Every structure is written in structure tokens, then in C-alpha cells.
Image: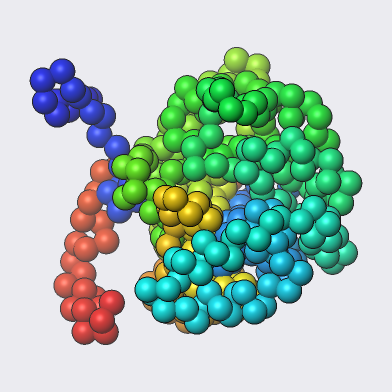
Amino acid sequence: MDIELGRGKRARRAYGFDEVALVPGKVTINPDEIDIGLRLGDLRIAVPILAAAMDGVVDPHFAVEMGRLGGLAVLNLDGLSCRYDDTGPVLDEIAEASRERVQAILQERYQAPVQDELIGRRIAEIKAEGVLCAVSTVPAEAERRLAIVAEAGADVYFVQGTVITARHISRSYRQLDFAQLVRASGMPIVAGNCVEYYTALELMTAGIAGILVGVGPGAACTTRGVLGVGVPQVTATADVAAARNDHRRTGGQPVTVITDGGMRVGGDVTKALAAGADGVMIGSVFAGASEAAGRGHHWGMATPDATLPRGTRITVGTRATLKELLFGPARVDDGSQNLVGAIKVAMGVCGARSIEEFQQTELVIAPAITTEGKLWQQAQQVGMGR
């Protein structure tokens, strides 16, 4: 139901992770008997969790470790790994910079050009370890880089912008034709980011294999503050999932919906899946892994824009190994570790054998779900400075 904001202006209520909760099912299932696999085109990924294409998270080493654990990490072709032969000193400089200086350093370091030779080399480094390789590019370079990426042996091609649409108006450059890109590619194309039903449906009609949901929800993203643009993730996911379902119902090929950003704990991940996602993409949680590239720091993909920065560096610290974040054992009680375990247990409690069944889980509006009856936990968190 629309709410009147003023004369002639109405708005639809939208919901984020903190405002909803899952309703347990009438039957419960042993978590060990649940299938959480994710399909992306013809590929099957054992863990439905992707690591975001952010320089504080993914470099070739992290991508290999994520692949060995059954997940998929996306390497940013516009990131530091494809601009510098040796990223170590640059990453150290970003991690050690003061708050006052870090934005200027980020803008300066991202002025170095992306090198096509490094793109091929980084993909080869990942593929040499026998894991899937996913890479991400800005739309303006998607067509030109396709041949480089394909020749190097990448398995999945992500095309990411702050907001992606199937139609774009510009007199200064030619827009990317997703349908043509899909036809030219021998690998799955994933487009993002999107938060709206009709836009998602149009992208799906172009033949993409997957779509990323989310504009500005990430911990290091400042798009919502700088531009005022975005839709809370539960509503955005449900809307794009509805487009996927309608696309499939009318004879379209399967499209994988991936909620991208805004998830801090296992409960957020399960809510994204129950809202309609087939998988999730996470940045800040993985930035805290000992294998992450950012030395306990995380910054947004849009940071290189020198005229209007839309990313910031945050300090997350190094809290656990990647294996502990995915599979446990959890060493903290805040839900940020053993994400796979959280998914399986929640699915078992809700009586879902697969993610597709989990998408039918009943949701309730529950803004007090994390605070109801938690007086002592809240007091303890305040005492610990959290």
C-alpha cells in the first residue's frame, strides 16, 4: 500500500533485513540432508555465497582459497590487481593511511591504468589452482575485455555498475548491448546492480544468467548518502525475484538472483534467501578474513571516481579464517561466522530441503526481532563499546 508523502506524491513502504523475520515451518529437517547448491548457467557452486569484487577482499590468492572451499570469489578487473604488478605496497599504503588522507590516496592509486596483460595473468593464476574463476568489469569495458577474459579461461563474467539497466542514453559513447554480449560470450554473464522489477525483467530478456540485487547497501558503499538512491534489500530482492519467476513462467531461461551487500550476519543471509534470492554476495564480512587482501580494511568499488567518491575505507579487523567464516566453528556469538551452518539450520527449522523451497518461507514484519527480550545482551554490547 502506498503512503502519501504530500499532495500528489506517494511512496511504497520497503523493508530491510532488520525489519523482517522468518516463520518456522510445520516440519523440520535435518540440516545435513539439505541442498544449498547454487546454479549459475551450466555451473554448479556448492556454497551459495560469493565474495564481492572489492579490492579489500578479493585478490587471486583469496579467489583460490574461496574456490577450494566450494564458494566463488569475483576478481575486480578494474581493481588494483589489474593495475599493479605488485599490489603489496599499494595495499599497505591504503591500510596504513590516516582517515584524513585515505580518500586522496585511493583516488591517486586508482589513476594507474588497467593493464590487459595483467588481466590475463591474474585469471591464469586462479585457473592454475583448479578452481572456478569469476571476474567483474565496468560496463564501458565489457565488450572489449570479453575476448581477453575468454582467452584466459575465466568461467563467469560479471558486468557491474552502481545501477545497471538494459537501456542507457548517451550522446558521447555507445551503450552496452547485453543481448549482443551474451551471444558473443561462451560463459555465463551476470549483470548488476539492480533493485527494480521491470529493469530486472528487461535484463533477463537479454539472456543474462544472473543478476545482482542492491544499490548502496554495503558497509563501504556511500551511494545512498551521496546520491540518495537505493531500495532496502528485502524489498529489492523480492521484486527482482518476482521478475525472475515471471520471466521463467513465460518461457525464459533460468536466471540466478544474487542479493549483493548489506548482510552482516547469518540471519541477514537467510532472510535474503527467503525473500527470493538464489545466492548472496558479501564483502565486509569476508574483508575480515585472514586471507583477505585488505589487511583488515575494506573500501568501495566506486572509490576511483575522483569527482564524486561513492566509497569509503572502513576498518573491519582480521577476525577469522575464511573457512571459519563459512563453516565455523564460530568463535564469536554475533552471527558473523559459520554462515553456511546458519543457512542450513534456518532451512531445516523452516522445513526447506532446497533454496527454492526456502524461498517459499513465510516472512513477518518484525522490527524488534533482534532486540525483544535482549536487555542483558544489549547492556553487555554497550559495555564492550559495540
Residue 168 location, x and y as percent?
A: 54, 25
Image quarter in which the N terminus is found:
top left
Q: Residue at x 73, y 74 (%)?
A: 86
Image quarter in which the C terminus is found:
bottom left
Residue 130 seen in the figure: no
Residue 109 seen in the figure: yes
Q: Nearer the viewer, residue 71 or 221?
A: 221
How many numbered marks appear?
Answer: 0
Left/right of residue 220 with respect to residue 184 in the rendered view: left
Q: Residue at x 27, y 61 (%)?
A: 370
Q: Residue at x 64, y 79 (%)?
A: 89
Determine which quarter of the picture holds residue 290. Answer: bottom right
Residue 13 location, x and y as percent?
A: 25, 34
Taking the view exactly as shown, the residue that stands out farthest to the left is: 7
Q: Nearer the viewer, residue 123 or 238?
A: 123
Residue 235 location, x and y as percent?
A: 37, 37
Q: Nearer the viewer, residue 205 or 85?
A: 85
Q: Residue at x 57, y 73 (%)?
A: 294
Residue 370 against residue 310 in the figure, above or below: below
Taking the view exactly as shown, the residue that stands out farthest to the top is: 250
Residue 342 location, x and y as percent?
A: 49, 62
